[in-house]
Image (tube, grey):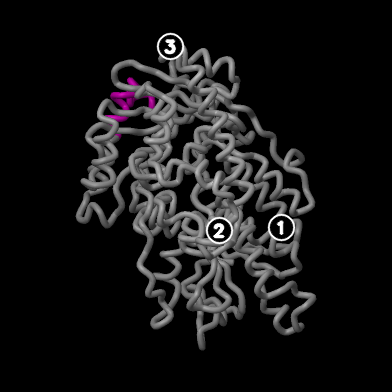
Amino acid sequence: MVGAGLGGLSAAIHLRRAGYRVTVYERNSRVGGRANRIEHGGFRCDTGPTLLNYPWIFEQLFEAAGRRLGDYVRLLPVDPSVEFRWPDGARFQLSSDMNRLLAECERLDPGSSSSMLDFFQDAAAKFRLSFDKLVTSNETSPLRWIGRLRVREILRTSIWRSLDGELARFFKSRYIREAFGSYGMYLGGSPFELPGVFSILPYGEIAHGLWLPKGGIHALVEAIARIAGETGVEIETDTDVSRIDVAEGRVRGIEFTDGRYREHSIVVSNVDRPSTDRDLLGGAHKSSRKPPKMTPGVMTFYWGVRGRIEGLGHHTIFLPEDYRGAFRDLCQRRRIPSGLPFYAAIPSETDPDLAPAGASTLFVLVPTPLLSEMPGCDWKAAACDVRARVLATLGLDPARIVFEEVWTPEDWSERFGLFDGSAFGASHILRQIGPLRQPNYSPEVGGLYYAGASTTPGTGMPMVALSGRMAAERIVERHGVPEAMGIEDFAHAR
């Protein structure tokens, strides 16, 4: 197993429970990949996700290891969950309390509460179809994949309609449409081009709630690594893989940067799939497949702030006045948007232990183009400019910042092998979903499999955890369980 991100840890647990001997090699000193941690002077900052959705997927992961999530992690509810803000002073706050949400709709756009109820009914049906029949399918045939749905169900998905077009069926308010459509930014496209089925994303977060593990997101990662170890998975950190050795079209082993070599007949890479194919497969075995369209890069700011940040809750998304123009800047003009969209998270509002007494932990994420889309960019200078714009929007005096780290797309690429600096993996445009997405196995190299955001089913912590399960299922389907293998193969299937 190359990489101890959530996808790799999930695959390791499922393979170990199937009887495989599993060793995970992680180049960094901490497990978690993008979901890592920065600690300084009592401040604890999650580097990636700042909220947890779809907690049942993690409950299932713990159950697969014979454990209970609640015995390892305490989930703190975050409600109100997200607030959206615009330069003209408009605000829209989400809540899993339906009465509160409907009242907010009426405040923002009188008469829209009935539209929200209609939207919920429609999105709930999409959500069930997606998770019951599509998301966790390892099907590689588009016809068989869509054939799992009846004609009426296919029509229900709105897969041919854009996300913005789907939202416009229900909401007249530009603010509600822009809020729900902004989820598209993290799927690698604009709401004007992504499929309408992704209306399930805002629905899913509202219907199933948003949560913060006590101790931060990385506390959940540490718990997953712990149960992996308890089931017999070996995790080696500070171990950098330089090459996946391939001979006669099959995986033979792994070579490390320190010159060591270990034989393996099955390898799961949790490194971005296109990075794996480009950087870890040598010579003629490099994939000839064109890299997928990727999600944007990000610039992230980690701040320890003196005192509380008044007026901001756990999670606030700032959207520009020219919403369509921001997506055009990011996706077509390939520049940091002139009207800056970003989100700010203050997890210490939910868990005060993430900051020293009387202080706040503040995380800001700003989407950017990919590294290849801004060649020659001075990312440090760009970060200084963005920093000033963010602080001005927040109204935060920089003198209150007592601790700071800034990561650009270059940093993300270097630290975690993110292809082209893409923060969330392969995009979710229509030609890259379901069986059209790059599969979790290599057609060219026998014994090579993938887990993570750039393979199926997609990006986000729950999907990445599912990707590990699906990769393990693919391996068991193709190779059987160790009891059915020869003793020599069993020793190498690690």
Q: Quadrant of residue 220?
A: top right
At which x and y percent is residue 181?
40, 34
Q: CA distance from mark 2 to mark 1?
A: 35 Å
Among numbered discs 3 and 1, the one appearing first in the sequence:
3
Q: Where's the N terminus, which quadrant? A: bottom right
Magenta region's main secondary structure? helix
Q: Is residue 395 magenta?
A: yes
Q: What residue does disc 3 label?
A: 110
* Mark 3 residue crowding within 10 angstroms, few (<14) / some (14–19) / many (20+): few
Residue pictured at 75% horizontal, 74% vertical:
482
Residue pictured at 78% horizontal, 48% vertical:
67
Residue pictured at 53% horizontal, 19% vertical:
101
Which of label 3 and label 2 is nearer to you?
A: 2
At which x and y percent is residue 125?
58, 37
Q: Quadrant of residue 184?
A: top left
* Mark 2 residue crowding within 10 angstroms, few (<14) / some (14–19) / many (20+): some
User: Could you tell me which secondary element the residue under label 3 belongs to?
Assistant: loop
Q: What residue does disc 1 label?
A: 229
Q: Is residue 324 left or right of residue 414?
A: left
Q: In this picture, is 231 found above or below 385?
A: below
Span colored in magenta: 387-403
Residue 402 shows in the view? no
The amino acid at mark 1 is Gly
At which x and y percent is residue 205?
55, 33
Q: Residue furthest front?
A: 151
Disc on res. 189 = none
Q: CA distance from mark 3 to mark 1?
A: 54 Å
In terms of depth relative to the viewer, which is nearer, 181 or 165?
165
Cβ–Cβ below 8 Å for labels 3 and 2? no
Q: Is residue 232 magenta?
A: no
At which x and y percent is residue 451?
55, 60
Disc on res. 145 = 2
